[in-house]
Image: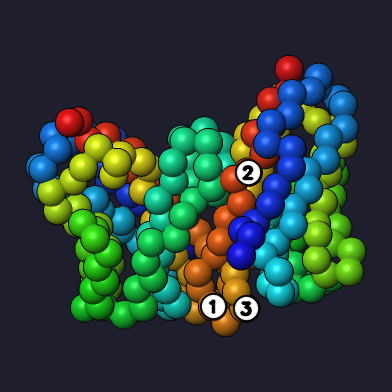
């Protein structure tokens, strides 16, 4: 059974204080690892898809990386508007189902 | 282009009452997903449609939950009767194509069962 574990559960940063969120996964054949951002009262918003170990993608202050067992979401010089829950999900090679982690709640203080 | 539309946004009902949620996916998207999201958890798949066909409903509690997608566009998810444990956010999502990985989510319906 696919498993996705995210850490930490919650993270509080000062504005400008860079950090990383972790997503470790167990899947029989990865067909994509996904990062989403979710604001309170809204649906998840797609950020990145990573397909193979060594792949990296960037968007503004966010950078996602992938290894064979985990993915990191690096946040460089965060701003208060980056405060949200960040969800990681995996899709295994045998199906279309996404398995989500429980998320990391990020709070960035001005 | 309009995103995924869901209604109602909020619903409060008494236990044992029926409830229905509606989803209109992005125009032209043939695949549609319904997810359940409990507080502090990630979304969990309930059912996946390809056009009118439910191709994965293995996670749908069929004793009280049902879904339909007539004409392969709008979809309705129903609970009858609702239980206290059904309180959650119900999300609808659609990818551009079955081969695309990016899923566009609607805002969800927050259900509270009293």
Q: Which mark is residue B108?
A: 2
Res. A94 visible in picture: no
Counting from the top left corner in percent of width and height, residue A63 is at: 22, 63
Report how far apart the C-alphas of labels 3 and 2 lie in the structure: 21 Å
Report how far apart the C-alphas of labels 1 and 2 lie in the structure: 22 Å
Residues at discs 1 and 3 in contact (Cβ within 8 Å):
yes
- The chain identifier of the residue carrying mark 2 reads B
Going from N to C along the chain, the mark reached first, 3 or 2, is 3
Left or right of B18? Residue B34 is: left
Residues at discs 3 and 2 in contact (Cβ within 8 Å):
no
Q: Quadrant of the C terminus of chain B?
A: top right
Secondary structure at badge 1 equals loop
How busy is the neighbourhood of tag 3: few (under 14 within 10 Å), some, or many (20 plus)?
some
Q: Residue A96 appears in which quarter of the rendering?
A: bottom right
Above or below B63: residue A27: below
Left or right of A10? Residue B98 is: right
How busy is the neighbourhood of tag 2: few (under 14 within 10 Å), some, or many (20 plus)?
many
Left or right of B42? Residue A35 is: left
């Amino acid at each position: 059974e696919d498993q996705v574990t995210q850490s930490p559960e919650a993270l509080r940063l000062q504005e400008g204080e860079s950090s990383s969120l972790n997503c470790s996964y167990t899947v029989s054949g990865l067909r994509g690892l996904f990062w989403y951002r979710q604001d309170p009262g809204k649906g998840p918003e797609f950020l990145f898809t990573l397909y193979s170990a060594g792949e990296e993608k960037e968007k503004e202050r966010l950078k996602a990386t992938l290894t064979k067992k985990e993915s990191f979401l690096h946040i460089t010089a965060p701003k208060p508007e980056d405060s949200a829950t960040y969800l990681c999900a995996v899709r295994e090679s045998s199906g279309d189902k996404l398995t989500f982690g429980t998320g990391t709640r990020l709070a960035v203080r001005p | 282009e309009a995103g995924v539309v869901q209604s109602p946004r909020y619903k409060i009902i008494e236990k044992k009452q029926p409830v229905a949620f509606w989803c209109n996916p992005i125009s032209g998207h043939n695949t549609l997903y319904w997810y359940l999201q409990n507080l502090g958890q990630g979304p969990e798949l309930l059912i996946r449609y390809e056009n009118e066909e439910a191709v994965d409903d293995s996670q749908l509690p069929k004793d009280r939950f049902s879904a339909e997608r007539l004409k392969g566009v709008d979809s309705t998810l129903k609970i009858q009767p609702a239980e206290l444990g059904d309180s959650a956010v119900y999300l609808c999502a659609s990818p551009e194509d079955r081969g695309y990985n990016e899923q566009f989510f609607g805002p969800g319906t927050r259900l509270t069962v009293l």
